[in-house]
Image (cartoon, rainbow, N blue to C red):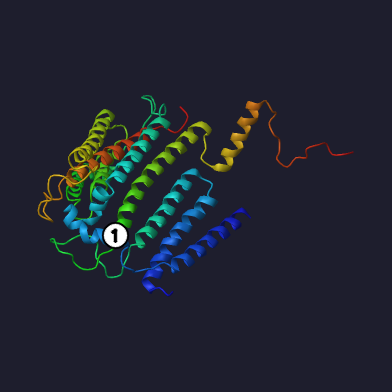
């Protein structure tokens, strides 16, 4: 009975949403703000990737809020799981098989290079600090999956995270002091489409990439070091 | 208003993902599966948001060699979804940490068992005798 009503609820909600979707202006030109950014973004910000221009320049303070949410989540996980670390006398998960171990060793340098590339080219190509940061986190977490007995150095992770977050805020404050707008693009725009262009945007994305990478690697490592069963 | 077939498929897919996730949330009993259902519903919502900026035949909002390649899709929904995905990861990690705590405290992640054990603990803390059966009559049967 409970399942039946649940299915009825889900089906009704789906029908309702589809009816609403049929009335949406699909395929219309971008909305006013989007149209303006598409028109002025390249000259105003100097980033070839306009999504990056939105994320770091037009909505830069939202990105700072997003980073704080991620930090709060990581801190919350640390708080909730405190006291649940696997003790030395408890046996860790078994070591990964040959394929996982070999792949972890082989992929580590490749993942680091791809992650850094994606972070550095965030203003030119699809990608950026968030996407590249997750790849960097995967590079450092994959060996832990293969050898669950190891552990990340949490002090280093916390330092990288704190310095990257501080750098983001400092670049924003510098722009506030010079130009009067928090996170306004600085350092000139450069040639559109070259690696050294878009002013401070690549620097901001490097900070975001390091922070996201450190945060997610630390999160996954904390979850991995936790022992759920009763001691 | 009639939609082109491609848009119908895309919207139906996004709404279906959302509905599958919600149905999993309402019907599921295992806490880990609830977290996964939340992730599926979130994917549906993100897809719906990205679709709101979609235009058939338009380019990604990236300038190629400094030129505008043609009509481009709306960049704002894409930036919003980037935010939503990152926050989703944080929420899922927090939810999983809470599930681990529950597993440690009650030894189970099944909601039914969990509810029963929670009630036992509450009764014990209140000094009530353990409930024998939920369906037992409240008073003695008249002779």
> Where, by quadrant of the figure, is residue A1 drawn?
bottom right
Instruction: For the C terminus of chain A, give its image quadrant.
Output: top left
Looking at this view, name the residue that lies furthest to the front: A180
Q: What residue lies at 37% left-to-right and 42% top-to-bottom?
A: B90
Q: Is residue A28 above or below residue A67?
A: below
> Where, by quadrant of the figure, is residue B13 drawn?
bottom left
Question: Which residue in the protein does label 1 denote?
Answer: A34
What chain letter is assigned to the residue under label 1?
A
Q: What residue lies at 40% left-to-right and 68% top-to-bottom?
A: B9
Nearer to us in this view, A30 or A68: A30
Residue A108 shows in the view: no
**Relative image position of residue A63 (x, y in whole percent):** 29, 45
Q: What residue lies at 10% left-to-right and 51% top-to-bottom?
A: A190
* Left or right: residue B39 compared with residue B27: left
Q: Is residue A126 above or below residue A83?
A: below
**Relative image position of residue A17 (x, y in whole percent):** 48, 62
How many numbered marks, from 0 up?
Answer: 1
Residue A13 shows in the view: yes
**Relative image position of residue A68 (x, y in whole percent):** 33, 38
- Density class for disc 1 (Cα within 10 Å; few <14, some 14-19, many ≥20) is many
Circle 1: element type: helix
* Left or right: residue A1 compared with residue A161: right
**Relative image position of residue A79 (x, y in whole percent):** 40, 30
């Amino acid at each position: 009975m409970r399942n039946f009503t649940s299915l009825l609820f889900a089906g009704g909600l789906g029908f309702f949403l589809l009816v609403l979707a049929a009335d949406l202006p699909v395929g219309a030109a971008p909305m006013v703000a989007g149209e303006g950014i598409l028109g002025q973004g390249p000259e105003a910000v100097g980033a070839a990737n306009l999504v990056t221009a939105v994320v770091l320049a037009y909505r830069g303070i939202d990105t700072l809020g997003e980073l704080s949410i991620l930090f709060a989540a990581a801190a919350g996980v640390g708080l909730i799981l405190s006291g649940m670390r696997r003790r030395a006398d408890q046996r860790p998960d078994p070591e990964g098989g040959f394929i996982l171990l070999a792949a972890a060793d082989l992929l580590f340098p490749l993942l680091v290079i791809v992650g850094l590339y994606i972070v550095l080219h965030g203003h030119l190509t699809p990608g950026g600090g968030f996407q590249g940061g997750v790849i960097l986190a995967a590079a450092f977490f994959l060996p832990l999956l293969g050898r669950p007995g190891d552990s990340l150095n949490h002090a280093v992770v916390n330092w990288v995270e704190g310095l990257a977050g501080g750098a983001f805020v400092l670049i924003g404050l510098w722009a506030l002091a010079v130009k009067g707008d928090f996170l306004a693009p600085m350092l000139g725009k450069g040639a559109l489409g070259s690696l050294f262009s878009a002013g401070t945007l690549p620097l901001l994305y490097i900070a975001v990439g390091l922070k996201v990478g450190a945060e997610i690697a630390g999160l996954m490592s904390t979850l991995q070091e936790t022992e759920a069963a009763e001691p | 208003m009639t939609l082109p077939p491609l848009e119908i498929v895309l919207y139906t897919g996004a709404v279906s993902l959302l509905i599958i996730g919600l149905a999993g949330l309402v019907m599921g009993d295992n806490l880990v599966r609830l977290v996964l259902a939340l992730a599926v519903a979130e994917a549906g919502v993100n897809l719906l948001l990205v679709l709101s900026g979609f235009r058939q035949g338009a380019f990604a909002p990236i300038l190629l060699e400094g030129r505008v390649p043609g009509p481009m899709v709306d960049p704002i929904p894409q930036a919003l979804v980037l935010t939503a995905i990152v926050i989703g990861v944080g929420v899922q990690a927090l939810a999983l940490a809470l599930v681990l705590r529950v597993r440690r405290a009650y030894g189970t992640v099944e909601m039914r068992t969990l509810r029963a054990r929670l009630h036992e603990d509450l009764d014990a803390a209140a000094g009530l005798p353990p409930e024998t059966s939920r369906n037992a009559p409240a008073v003695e049967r008249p002779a």
